[in-house]
Image (cartoon, rainbow, N blue to C red):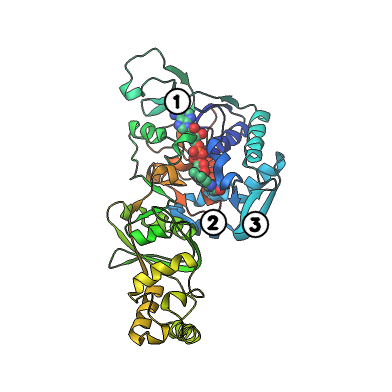
Amino acid sequence: MSVVLIIGGGAAGMAAAIAAAGCGHEVRLYEKNEKPGKKLFITGKGRCNVTNACDMDSMMKNVVTNPRFLYSSFSGFTNRDMMDLLERNGCPLKIERGDRVFPVSDKSSDVIRALVKQMKDLGVKIYLNTPAAGLRVEDGCCRGILLGTGRRESGFSGGSRVSFVPGDAVIVATGGLSYGTTGSTGDGYKFAEDCGHTVTSLHPSLVPMNALEADVKELQGLSLRNIEAVITDGRKELFREFGELLFTHFGVSGPVILSASSFVAGILQKQPLSLTIDLKPALTQEQLDARLLRDFKEFSNKQFKNSLSRLYPAKMIPVMIARSGISPDKPVCEITREERLRLAEATRRFKVTLTGLRGYNEAVITQGGVSVGEVNPATMESKKVKGLYFAGEVLDLDAVTGGFNLQIAWSTGWAAGSGIPYV
Ligand SMILES: Cc1cc2nc3c(=O)[nH]c(=O)nc-3n(C[C@H](O)[C@H](O)[C@H](O)COP(=O)(O)OP(=O)(O)OC[C@H]3O[C@@H](n4cnc5c(N)ncnc54)[C@H](O)[C@@H]3O)c2cc1C
């Protein structure tokens, strides 16, 4: 039996605790909040999209950063394993659109309750309101953790408020930087760097974006379904997807934009990017022109501004009129072919300049983290420090929405907890 110390009582930390205790180790879990799973509680808008019921191939395809690193842990502890674990502990699940898995009760608290029950049944000791301040590493081995509000080991000046807890293995499952009020304040990155690990460049992801144009902000609150969004850096296409987009007071959000951020966040932090929205992607150029001709024929006695209600949502009409450059009062029967083509162009290519990402407090995840090249993918053990393990969002791993990010936390947590040798 080994003494296993886990820092962080989020998804990854709890999965690690259950796996390690199930292997017969003595497990102590340290959580700085007054309760475990504070972020889990707000996931899936309070319903917790626990995982995705797709096959493992699709699971890998939905991972954006370092999918191959997850091959071993995804197979070792699958989405089905996680679903079984929750159902065995009194949290029945259901599968919704897109294979998204939720508790039948639609309450994330039931997921947390099931995990806490399983930890308690297995004898995991949970220490709440107990922040870890650092790790102690000697001779290339992790010897334990420092608790308390004092400084980290590297800068520790002997203050009396830090105590040392020895252990045979330490699992760092401190999460990322997003929604810091849930406790994810990036402590694990510092712990890792202090031990000589590389932390790759960090940025918010699955996050809305700021836009430059004032007319985009006028559209705030408007949600558009079935659009196509294309993002380029002016030369190269970086992202293209059909779906739903939401205009906000600062720019753009909604599923398509959150997905896009997974692929362009790093670049957008350095330079503005161009978003082109096709408002009618189901129509060819000719079909769109025919559609405009038909509407204009029907409304031929009206003013231009009163002829667009079938084509665009009401909020969008003034913006489209301005972008088309056609006078709003012009009689429809006087609109020229050139003007009609300009309107079609504005419809096909609604241009938005993306100027940056919103912050971590609006980001679902943090992209970047402890470099996976320095971690054993089967056990999550550090290749630099013996007895030190990483799990969950603290690692340089992330996926699109749909339950995939939590599956990363469950699978890597499980791999870490079950990879610890007996001493
Ligand atoms: C609003 C929102 C909705 C989301 N919805 C979904 C969803 O429905 N499905 C999905 O798959 N993913 C979702 N995610 C992403 C998902 O929540 C994360 O991927 C997942 O929680 C990561 O798990 P983790 O255990 O690595 O980190 P966390 O869940 O962040 O847990 C880390 C824990 O470590 C603790 N901690 C940190 N530092 C210390 C320290 N020094 N000492 C002690 N404890 C410490 C923290 O307090 C925290 O409890 C959502 C995220 C957000 C922000």
The crowd level at tag 2 (other Cα within 10 Å; few <14, some 14-19, many 20+) is: many
* Image quarter hosting the N terminus: top right
* x 50%, y 73%: residue: 309
Total numbered labels: 3
Label 3 sits on residue: 96
Label 2 sits on residue: 59
In the image, the residue with mark 1 has its CB under 8 Å from the nearest atom of ligand 1? yes
- Which amino acid type is marked by label 1? Ala
The span from disc 2 to disc 1 (Cα, nearest Å) is 33 Å
Is residue 241 positioned above or below 370 on the image?
A: below
* Residue 282 left/right relative to 323: right
Label 1 sits on residue: 132
* x 55%, y 54%: residue: 402
Tag 1's secondary structure? strand
The crowd level at tag 3 (other Cα within 10 Å; few <14, some 14-19, many 20+) is: few
Q: Nearer the viewer, mark 1 or mark 3?
A: 3
The span from disc 3 to disc 2 (Cα, nearest Å) is 16 Å
Query: Which mark sits nearer the N-terminus, 2 or 1?
Result: 2
Foreground of the two, 109 or 352 = 352
Q: Nearer the viewer, mark 3 or mark 2?
A: 3
